[in-house]
Image (cartoon, rainbow, N blue to C red):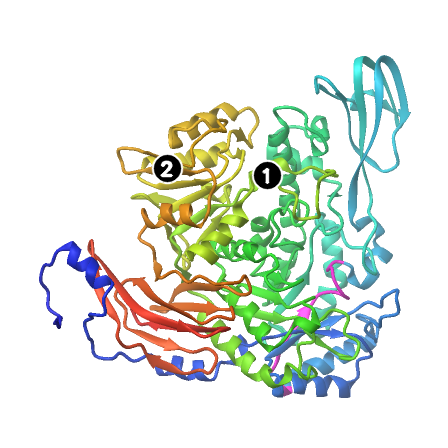
Amino acid sequence: MYLKCIKYKISNLLLIALLFTGISCKKEKEKLPEDLVQNFKNPPNEFKPMPFWHINGELTTTGIKQQMKDAKEKAGFSGISVLPLAPKKNGRPGTTPKFLSKKYLERYQDVLNTAEDLDMQVILYDDNDFPSGMAGGKIGELFPQHTMKRLDKVEKRIEGPSRFKQNIPAGKLVSAVAMNQKTRQLIELSNYIENETLQWQVPKGTWKIMFFVMVKDSYHKAFPVVDYLDTTAVREMIRLTYDVYKENFESYFGNTIKMTFFDDVGFFKHPRTWTGLFNKKFMDLNGFDPKPWYPALWYDIGPETEAIRHAFFNTRAELLAEGFPKLVGEWTKENGLKDTGHPPGNYDPTPIDMNGDIFKFFRHTEIPLTDAIIEYQFGQNGHKLISSAADYYDKPIVSTEIYGAYKEQAFDSLMLYRSAMDLFSRGVNLVVPHGMWYNPDQVYISPLVSSDSEKLAPTLPRYSNFVGRSCMLLQGGKRVANIAVLYPFEELAGWYHFEAPDNPRQGFYVSPETNYQKISGLLTNDIRQDFTFIHPEYFLDNKYKIEQGSVLLNNVTNKQKYDALIITGCKIISLKTLQKVKSYFDQGGLVISTGQLPFKSSELGQDEKIKKLIIEIFNINPEDTQVSEIKINGNSNGGKAIYISEPNEHTLSGAITENVVTDVAFNPTPKLSTNKGKFNYIHKIKDGKNIYFFSNSSDETITTEVTLQGKHYLFNANPHNGDIQEIKNLTHSKFNNQEFTKATLMLKPVSSTFWLSNQ
């Protein structure tokens, strides 16, 4: 049967049949804009990779010119980030001339001159090695009072009644508290301190008397690091580094130098980082004195434990966000530049002991960055946190520092593509490879990604064009994802405490209920539905509107609409956030719980209200451990709440596909035989065009039918070679007044493609 393109009524059953057949309506071929076609074939330099250039040796004018020429002409890189290195104790060479010395600045001038000659960009890396904030050692040398601080606990166990007398331990005392070991009663002892001595009559019972003191912290690299949480300290650091570059090279700002880079700003190897103004900031944010509550940072203090810990760690997150990244962001903006960079562990399960709060950290950063390092797919389920933060802040570019510390022997030309395409599907659209080395014979952070690498050199120009084409299409616009996942910050903050004996490693100490990264992986890699993390505090903003059973993110550019809201496993949640979730449910929204339902509040004294709201939404007692696998509750407005006790691909997929008209659907859903590589997608709308990116980083060929919401006439744009071809044999159909387009997708191993539509 041949179906002509005429308007007439047919039954819904026939429409469903049309959706899954090869019958289609033909339309005269549309053309893509010629400038897009030409730029895709030959991508502009600004979108190509700009790697780290580790300077492990003596900079010379001749060496600079030759290596930058090779980077441009042999590798296809559009720029470099000069990364000076501090000398290592084991004899590994650092950068000479000395960082920010007169001779160093002369060589940096050579870099800029060469960049101008070659039409390359230079990313201003802000320190001598990483982490940022050492100022090449000058912070520790000139301003030792402004280096990183640590919170220590000094305690004694005392039987009362008795008289206790002890001098205050060395350091700055921030609190002194006694805790009854049986009742957990807390008594703040500052009124009993005189002349640096605590004297107190201990009541009956067994007590721990605890002194909480802030001390100067040690350092794990060549030099002490600035106190990231102290704005006075950070301003001195900026004066010693950023301002020196401005004084010498301001004329290059906005042209040759367009971007700055900071590295590993956070708490790595310093989980108890503290600062002098902490108590004041806590009082400002929370409205009560933190001193009586300090034991909660180490111990269970009773029903208030989770709310108090949340208050402490949220305060520290705010201090970090308003410290280094804010002041650096302001400096770069004032000087016509854009800043990028990252904290440590930005992809790890918990931010609490690594970066505070990944959403807040990037509040003032123009280009949020995720570092895809250590090994292929490490932290993969956390990368969406960074792009989701960018979505909320309406920031068009998300960068990645990629490949650092991958093992050289396992790294090949295919790995260049595997990692990059996985990250493109997760929202990245600017690539900083890790990296080039000035002396390629002494690489101590593998792999070598430069024309000096015999195994990679032949493929680098093609790779650079692949990155350029992909980033050109993916930068800017709005991302389409109709599923939202609440980021469980309250659970992470309420659970964490210092020096837990069962803490496996920094960034990984989470409650048994925490499964948000598992849900991230299920959605992205198994069910293959894109989603956005929503920060529970930001969910309260006016940016998020509830309309007709959906949540709308009302950005200027990156507007998003969510038709499902997922609460991942947690015991702790904000009352205000849950109240807005209830409002969404009451107005016809779909709420899905994937695991433990919350019954504790991140606000003091509100636990019973949390329990009541959960019962109203899910009709489940959240403290009941005998609830069946799946339970569904509804209301008269069409709201639906689905509880899944043990989420997996089947149960979560059913909850979504049976209740949400998905933006992109696959039939069959591809199944890969190994975990080496993934099949993913991302959908963006930019300049009136729908842009779909499909990636297959596996070693298997994938063939599937793809159904897209909307009526599209599509072109296949191959980022590997720049070819653009019309996609023929499309199927257009209509169901429940919604139009759909279906086409066949075939991806060979380690390959990707774009589908482009003018509608």
Q: Position of residue 118 (x, y in %)?
A: 62, 86
Q: Residues within 10 Å of mark 2 (few under 14, many from 20)?
A: many
Residue 322 seen in this snapshot: no
Q: Position of residue 286 (x, y in %)?
A: 60, 33
Q: Is residue 493 above or below residue 701?
A: above
Rendered residue at 67%/49% (across/down)? 354
What mark, if any, has residue 641 been given in the picture? 2
Q: Which residues are magenta?
A: 117-133
Q: Quadrant of residue 12?
A: bottom left
Looking at marks 2 and 1 on the same chain, the residue that comes earlier in the sequence is marked by: 1
User: Going by the image, does 71 lie left or right of 667?
Assistant: right
Q: Is residue 226 magenta?
A: no
Q: In the rendered structure, which amino acid carries the disc numbered 1? A: Pro
Rendered residue at 43%/48% (across/down)? 484
The residue singled out by tag 1 in the image is: 512
Q: Position of residue 331 (x, y in %)?
A: 64, 61
Q: Residues within 10 Å of mark 1 (few under 14, many from 20)?
A: few
User: Going by the image, does 428 lie left or right of 151?
Assistant: left
Residue 316 seen in this snapshot: yes
